[in-house]
Amino acid sequence: MSIAAVREAIGLVLEEYPGLRTVGRWTMWGAVAVSTLASVVVVGTYWRGPVVRTNLYYIEVATQCLVFGLAVVVASLLIFMSHYPLQLSRNRLVSSIAFGTIVLAEALTLFVDSTAERLNVPAVDMTLVVFSTICVAAWGTMLGPQEVVVKPKHSPTENDARLLQQLASIERALGRVGRSRA
């Protein structure tokens, strides 16, 4: 579920920039691959250890690695969004922030749970459920009617123009790389 949410967030935020969207998705799948490899290494270290563990332990380790990898991608996406003037519609911005916050909260909850003796802190887990519910409710109430054209709220400053020019040049370079591979 988290992978699908992050993939869609990247697609929505970078819809106007197909080259950057592709790199964002490659980054996400790279994070998933590294997370899977890390979980296999961690699980492999404890597989034949002196303590017999249930299969749930190994699933929990894999889940933690995956969510932490996705949290890095989400944090990077939120930083990217705050750095470049992408002129996103209100709905895209609200959706990205809401679901990004939920993924980051899940990562924090899994980190706290991993420090517990039984890999579970019921109060923290219940807090995550309440927080996620609040985020989804806020997301639903903050969505507006679908916007057809996004108009900038202010005239672009010199810095905004420079950042947009950088973004366009990165997009052109990534577009050439994508076309040369096809």
Image (cartoon, grey):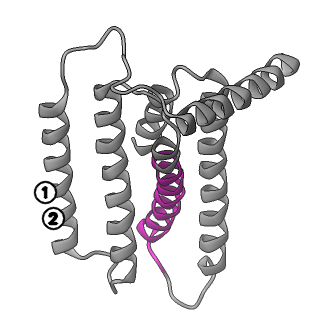
Q: Is residue 7 left or right of residue 124?
A: right
The residue nearer to you, when weighing 61 against 182, is 182
Give the SS element for disc 1: helix
Q: Spot the residue most to the right.
A: 180
Residue under the point 75% across and 22% down: 172
Residue under the point 34% across and 24% down: 89
Looking at the image, is 40 positioned above or below residue 138? Answer: below
Residue under the point 33% across and 25% down: 153
- Residue 179 falls in which quadrant of the image? top right
Which of the numbered marks, if any, corresponds to residue 126? Answer: 2
| Span highlighted in magenta in the image | 53-78
In percent of width and height, residue 28 lies at 59, 43
Circle 1 is placed at which residue position?
A: 130
Q: Considering the image in quadrants, where does the N terminus appear?
A: top left
Residue depth check, mark 2 versus mark 1: number of the one nearer the observer: 1
The residue nearer to you, when weighing 137 against 110, is 137
